[in-house]
Amino acid sequence: QVQLMESGGGSVQAGGSLRLSCEASGSGFRLTAIGWYRQASGKQRELVATVTSGGSTNYGDSVNGRFTISRDYDMNRVYLLMNSLKSEDTAVYYCNVRGYHYTDALDVWGQGTLVTVSS
C-alpha cells in the first residue's frame, strides 16, 4: 500500500508563509494526482490544491494566487507553499494521493497537519 508522511504545519501570524510537504512511500503504486485538502472546525473538507502526473494544477478559489503547489518529478513528494496567510486559512490540512496500487484504484489520505494563522 501507500503511506503518507506530512510535515510543515504550525502557527504563523497573518500575512506570513508556511510550506507543507507530503511524501508518499511504499511499493507497487503509481500516482495520477497528489494534493492538499483542508478542514476547518465545523466546516466540510475542501480542496486546497492538486497536481496531476501530467503537471496540471487545480486550486480552490479561496487560495488561488496565494498558494502554490509543486511536486517532485517522480510524483512521490508534493509541496504547498502558502503565502499571505489569513486567519480563515486556519484548518487541518490533509494530503491526498490518487492512482493505482498495481491494478487497484488508490485513494489515500494522510492524517493531517494543523495550520493556525493568528491575526
Image (spheres, rainbow, N blue to C red):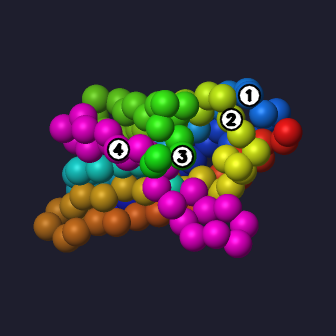
Does the CB distance between marks 4 and 1 fall below 8 Å? Answer: no
Amino acid type, mark 1? Gly
C-beta proximity under 8 Å, tags 1 and 2: yes
The residue depicted at 45 percent of the width and 48 percent of the height is 60
Q: Are marks 3 and 1 in contact (CB under 8 Å)?
A: no
**First of labels 3, 2 by sequence position:** 3
Q: Is residue 79 visible?
A: no
Q: Mark 1 to mark 2: distance in Å?
A: 5 Å
Residue on which the image places disc 2: 85
Give percent across and percent down for residue 107.
34, 66
Q: Indicate which disc, 4 or 1, sits on the residue closer to the N terminus.
A: 1
- CA gap, disc 3 to disc 4? 12 Å
Q: Amino acid at mark 3?
A: Ser
Image position of 17 with respect to 99: above or below: above
- Residue that label 4 marks: 58
- The residue that label 3 is drawn on is 62
The x and y percentages for residue 45 are 54, 66
Which image quadrant is residue 86 in?
A: top right
